[in-house]
Image (cartoon, grey):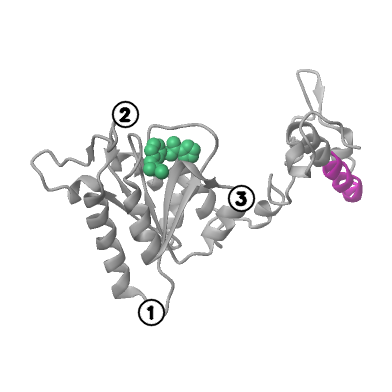
Amino acid sequence: MRIDVVTIFPAYFDALEISLLGRARQRGLLETHVHDLREAAHDRHRTVDDTPAGGGAGMVMKPEPWGEALDGLLGAAGEEREPGETEPLIVFPSPSGERFTQETARELAAERRLIFGCGRYEGIDQRVFDEYGERGRVRLLSLGDYVLNGGEVAVLAMVEAIARLIPGVVGNPESLVEESHEQGLLEYPVYTKPAVWRGREVPPVLLGGDHGAVEAWRREQSLERTRRVRPDLLGLQAGRAAE
Ligand SMILES: COC(=O)COc1cccc(COC(=O)c2cn[nH]c2)c1
């Protein structure tokens, strides 16, 4: 998979060189390119923002630099794209986006190429989303109901959630199956050695060697934890005991 990121803070993405993602890149499973939006701003101050039309506080990201940066990337894709191949998906993290979930991560992990656009300030001029939404595929995705100063941190989270699902990136694919949200439930509590720590024991069922009993215990723990912490995942209203 090829991932391009457009941002005014490229240094945020030095983190992609580290650990899991760094190894995936070295093994050619993931190709990442980070682009400074200011290189597409040609005035003396490399301006990427301006005052909001209609007034109001803060600044809005101008459409021209985004247009030049994204055309450059899509054009680059044009050279490689087979005829009829789908346009790369362009993802903008946004507080007003659709919810990014494990399901979204699975969908995006199937893409050949992703472009991430990091908004800042009060947001990006709407015409950028309109322009590229007509020409190809654009998705505004939210990590949650809170506001960050910009999309960079959200892109790092999304890239990690997506890249670890690419076959070969995570050593043991088994470990991807049972984690929280893969089965639509929260994961059961995990333990390791020592058998007793500060007087607290590992649940004996986990040390008894009866794999059937372990499976049953883990399933019950997942259901109990999900009921308690995230009843919405079970289609229950918060605060109501399951009937
Ligand atoms: C319409 O969307 C845009 O213009 C994108 O521009 C912005 C502006 C400010 C901040 C962000 C970053 O995303 C979040 O804050 C976010 C994502 N998930 N939860 C919070 C993006």
Residue 150 pos. (x, y %): 38, 36
Residue positioned 85% across, 32% down in the render: 203
Which span is picked out in magenta? 209-220
Up the image or down, 158 lies above or below 225; here it is below
Residue positioned 32% across, 34% down in the render: 121
Quadrant of the picture in which ligand 1 is shown: top left
Q: CA distance from mark 1 to mark 2?
A: 45 Å
Residue 1 in sight:
yes
Residue positioned 52% across, 53% down in the render: 162
Eye-nearest disc, 3 or 2: 2
Up the image or down, 84 lies above or below 43; here it is below
Task: Check disc 2 and report the residue beneath it.
Answer: 56
Q: Name the kind of residue labelled 3 in the image.
A: Gln
Residue 216 pos. (x, y %): 89, 46
Q: Quick one: label 1, few (<14), some, or many (20+) residues within 10 Å?
A: few
Q: Residue furthest left?
A: 44
Residue 100 lies left or right of residue 231; in this view the side is left
Q: Quadrant of residue 70?
A: bottom left
Q: Which mark is residue 82?
A: 1
